[in-house]
Image (spheres, rainbow, N blue to C red):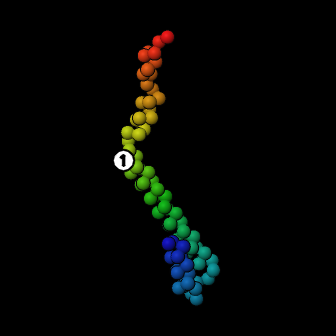
Amino acid sequence: MCQALSAFTLFITAPYLCTSVKILVVITVLLLALCGYIALEVLLKVQSRKDHPAVDELVVSTQNTDEGKDDIKA
């Protein structure tokens, strides 16, 4: 979508801007898209950790338990 936005902007401004300014416009739009993507990934990761906090606790608790060692004696 951001590539389409930058292409549309370049098409509209083609007769008025030189190539170096067009390149700066494309770079700016793509950097804004990258920042939005990173922000979305961080928000989704935080949200998934809030939704499933017990998963980390289960992993830690299963690694630290010594249950069953005393039950079987030869």
SS class, disc 1? helix
Residue at the spot of label 1: 51
Residue lying furthest top: 74
Which residue is outermost to the left?
Answer: 51
Q: Residue at x 53, y 85 (%)?
A: 12
| Residue 37 pos. (x, y %) | 48, 61
The answer to which of 57 and 5 lies nearer the viewer is 57
Residue 3: image quadrant is: bottom right
Q: Residues within 10 Å of mark 1 (few under 14, many from 20)?
A: few
Position in image of residue 16 (x %, y %): 56, 87
Q: Which residue is at 40% across, 35% downward?
A: 57
Residue 18, position as x, y percentages in the image: 61, 82
Residue shown at 50% from the left, 72% from the top: 1
The kind of residue on which mark 1 rests is Asp
Compared with residue 8, is residue 64 higher up or lower down, i.e. above or below?
Answer: above
Looking at this view, name the residue that lies furthest to the front: 74
